[in-house]
Structures are given as C-alpha cells and as structure tokens.
Image: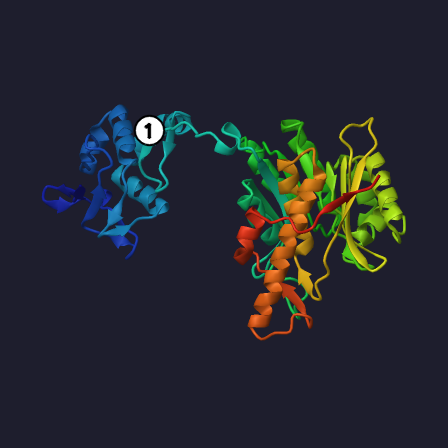
C-alpha cells in the first residue's frame, strides 16, 4: 500500500512540510510511503498546527514515521535521506520532545530493525548451531590453511574431502593467492595474526567456538603461528577434548619454505599441544634434529615426538633405501609403548601440488572414524590418495600432456568417489 503525501496550508504548499527529493536535491511535491503496518498512518500537518500539538503527539508521529520504508517517485531512499525527510516533516520543537523516547526505543533489546533500515520488529530467538546441538559421528573442524583461487592446495585441498567424509568444516585462509606459488606469477593477500584473532573473537562473540578438531597447515610467520597457539588455547577452553591435527609445513626434499625462526616455535610450542602430527621426512628431521636414513631412524624420531606431546605421529612420506614409506606411530595410553607400522607407497613418476594437505585431511577424517586403529585409517587415506593421483595422471595424458614434465594440479572433484569409498590397495605392516 502506497500513501501519497502532499502538505498544504490554505491551498498552498507549506515550505516546512515539503518532503526532500534526494535525486534533484530540491522540494518535491509528492512522496510515496509504503506502510509497514496497516495501523500506521502518517498525516503531515501544516507547520502552524504542528507547533500547537503537545510533545506527546510529536513523539507519536516520529515513532509512527520511523518504521516506514520510503520511496521517492518509485526510487528507494537511503537511510540518511529518510532522516532528512523526518527532519522536514517534524518541527524542531517536536524533534527535541521526542528524542528521549526514541533513545529508549533504540535501546530496547526486545526489538530489532529490519535489514532495510525500515520497520522495527520483535527480536527473534537465535537458532541453535545444528552441528553442535545435533552433533554427527564425525565433528566440526576449524581449518587454518592457505587458499588459492585456482587449483587445490591448503584449504582448497582439505575442506572438500573432509566434507565428503561427513565433517562440518569452517576454513580460515592464512593466505589467499590467485594460484599456488609454483606458477611464474601469483598475487594475493596474507592474513596476519591480528586479523586471525579478530575472526576468532567474532566467532566467540556469537558462541560459535565449539569445535571438535583444529587443523593447521602452511603458516608463514612467527607472529601468525603464535596466534594459532592462542587459538588452540581458546578452543580448548571451550572444548577440552579438542583434537589438534598439525601439519607442520616447513619444507620438503631439503628445501625450507618458511623463515628459519619458525622451526624453534614448532619444536618448543606447537608439538607439545598437538594431538596428531603429520610431518614429511624433511620436516621430521627439522623437528627432532635426527637424520632419517633408515626405518629405525623414522621410528626413533616418532618416539622423540611422542615424548614431546602428540599421541599420534605419522611421517607421511619418507624415501628410504629407494622405497617411499609412510611411517605411523600412536600411543593408546601414556603408559603403553607406541604401536608402530609402515605402508609402502607406490611411486608415481610425477610431481603434484596439494598432496600433503590432502593427506593430512584424509588422515584426520579416517582416524576419527577409527580412533584406535591408526593402521586402518592410514590404509584408507593412502589408498584414496593413490587412486586420486592415478586419475590425475590419466587425465593429463588424455589432454595430451606429459605428466612427468611439470607439477600437476590434482583432480579432486573428479575423485570424490575414491575419497568417500576407497578400495584399500596399500596395506599397513606392523613393526614388532
């Protein structure tokens, strides 16, 4: 319903009552006001009549006019134009009389203003977070990792598989780049520690910090890593049973990706609070100071890390005696010695991006389904990854590209069946 308003005094337009036209910035003879409630009517009075009204009448008119969504000749009027409109419809004396009641009206928590800035409605009860109120058999993951617009690394490689495995996943992007850094050029932004904490505080203010898992990957600065440690503490204050899965991304094949000073922060602060650690061969050497040249070296490194904190340690890839191995170790209790195993991983003659991030996500997902059987979880994770990599190589060959000549973007979306229902092709062998 549209109410057309024209203010007249003795047959003439009253200058004090002429509405404001935001388009021409001059008085307009006609304003259309759709009524938000049938009971709301707005009758502009001639200025001499308004001045005779009591302050209570002025207050009533201001509060009646406020909920209206204003249109000028069919065009939406912004909020600041609405205020100007109210100023010309109501005399200065009336505005002063109504200010106190408007202040009380604004501060009443039982009411809220609509998104249009117009009508005011009773506040509705906030709905529950269903992933908390009706928890699944999996959980709710906060994933702090890198992100690329194109391609699958970091969160782009981890979030989708975890969702396929039944998790609710909330990603925070430590960096946002156009593409991964293996391309000749890339652009983007880097999140700093203050910005990360601002996001956490926003979640906390809305009671959204109940997570079952925290997953972290690439972190490029000490300040950001220290903030991540604060995040761990904050999340565990909400859920003491939080599982922190840490992929300590620092480098590979002897090449360091991050500043040198991050190594000591990982050693002294991150490893002790992690529940599961998933370094590669180079990273476990950095964390322990132990050179890994044999399987026994790998097992010894796992034991060193167990003593520092995490109950589950998985060296996701170690090239030992020309064999590519996953070496896993987990302690069911503090008193018992760790159970340890290996999985030999078939070599594929190609280099892929995002596989470490994907491996850690799959290990998180399957170890949650098999919390006391890390061998089974690792078999499923490795078998799933291998099926995905084989598909990736086949697709590049079909496109006429030699997959051995460059790093390859993984075929994540096309491999969702292999992620959800992998066929075990890589078996674990326990160490005695």
Please, which residue is most extreme toward the bottom here?
Answer: 400
Image location of residue 347, percent across then percent down: 73, 61
Tell me if 305 is positioned left or right of 389 in this view: right
Q: Nearer the viewer, residue 5 or 17?
A: 5
Q: Nearer the viewer, residue 219 or 366?
A: 366
Q: Is residue 320 left or right of residue 393?
A: right
Look at the numbered disc 1 and give the secondary structure of its residue: helix
Residue 54, can we see it?
Answer: yes
Please state the horizontal and vertical placement of residue 426, each as a whole percent of the image. 69, 50
Residue 404: quarter of image = bottom right
Q: Residues within 10 Å of mark 1 (few under 14, many from 20)?
A: some
Q: Is residue 358 visible?
A: no
Question: Residue 40, located in which quarter of the rendered image?
Answer: top left
Q: Residue furthest left?
A: 11
Instruction: Please report the residue visible at 59 percent of the width from the left and 66 percent of the height from the top.
Output: 394
Q: Can you identify the residue that label 1 sits on? A: 98
Q: Nearer the viewer, residue 43 or 8?
A: 43
For the image, the number of numbered tags is 1
What's the residue at 62%, 44% (across, down)?
143
- Which image quarter holds the N terminus? top left
Residue 146, given in percent of the width and then of the height, sits at 64, 53
Q: Residue 328's spot in the image, x, y percent?
A: 77, 43
Viewer-closest of 369 and 291: 369
Write down the quadrant of residue 150 in the picture.
bottom right
> In the image, is residue 267 above or below residue 254?
above
The quadrant the C terminus occupies is top right
The scheme the figure's colours follow is: rainbow
**Is residue 426 shown left or right of residue 179?**
right
Q: Indicate whether 267 appears above or below 190.
A: above
């Amino acid at each position: 319903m549209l109410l057309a308003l024209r203010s007249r005094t003795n047959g003439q337009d009253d200058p004090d009552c002429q509405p404001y036209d935001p388009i021409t910035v001059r008085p307009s003879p006609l304003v259309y006001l759709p009524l938000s409630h049938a009971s709301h009517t707005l009758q502009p009075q001639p200025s001499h009549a308004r001045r005779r009204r009591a302050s209570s009448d002025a207050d009533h008119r201001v509060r009646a006019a406020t909920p209206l969504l204003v249109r000028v000749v069919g065009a939406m009027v912004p909020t600041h134009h609405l205020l100007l409109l109210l100023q010309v419809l109501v005399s200065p004396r009336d505005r002063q009389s109504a200010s106190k009641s408007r202040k009380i009206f604004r501060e009443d928590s039982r009411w809220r203003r609509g998104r249009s800035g117009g009508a005011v409605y009773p506040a509705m009860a906030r709905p529950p977070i269903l992933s908390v109120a009706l928890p699944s058999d999996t959980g709710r993951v906060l994933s702090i990792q890198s992100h690329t617009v194109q391609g699958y690394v970091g969160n782009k490689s981890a979030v989708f598989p975890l969702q396929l495995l039944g998790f609710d996943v909330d990603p925070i992007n430590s960096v946002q780049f156009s593409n991964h850094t293996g391309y000749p050029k890339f652009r983007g932004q880097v999140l700093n520690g203050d910005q990360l904490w601002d996001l956490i505080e926003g979640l906390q203010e809305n009671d959204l910090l109940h997570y079952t898992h925290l997953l972290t990957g690439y972190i490029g600065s000490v300040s950001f890593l220290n903030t991540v440690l604060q995040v761990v503490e904050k999340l565990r204050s909400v859920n003491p049973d939080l599982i922190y899965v840490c992929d300590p991304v620092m480098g590979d094949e002897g090449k360091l990706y991050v500043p040198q000073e991050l190594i000591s922060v990982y050693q002294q602060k991150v490893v002790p609070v992690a529940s599961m650690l998933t370094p590669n061969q180079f990273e476990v050497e950095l964390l322990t100071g132990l050179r890994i040249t044999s399987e026994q070296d790998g097992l010894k490194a796992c034991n060193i890390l167990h003593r520092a904190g995490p109950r589950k340690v998985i060296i996701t890839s170690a090239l030992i005696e020309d064999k590519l191995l996953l070496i896993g170790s987990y302690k069911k209790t503090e008193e018992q010695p760790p159970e340890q195993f290996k999985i030999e991983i078939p070599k594929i003659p190609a280099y892929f991006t995002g596989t470490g991030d994907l491996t850690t996500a799959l290990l998180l997902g399957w170890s949650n389904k098999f919390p006391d059987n890390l061998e089974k979880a690792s078999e499923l994770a490795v078998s799933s990854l291998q099926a995905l990599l084989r598909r990736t190589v086949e697709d590049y060959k079909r496109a006429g590209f030699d997959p051995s000549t460059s790093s390859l973007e993984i075929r994540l979306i096309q491999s969702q069946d292999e992620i959800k229902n992998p066929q075990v092709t890589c078996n674990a062998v326990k160490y005695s």
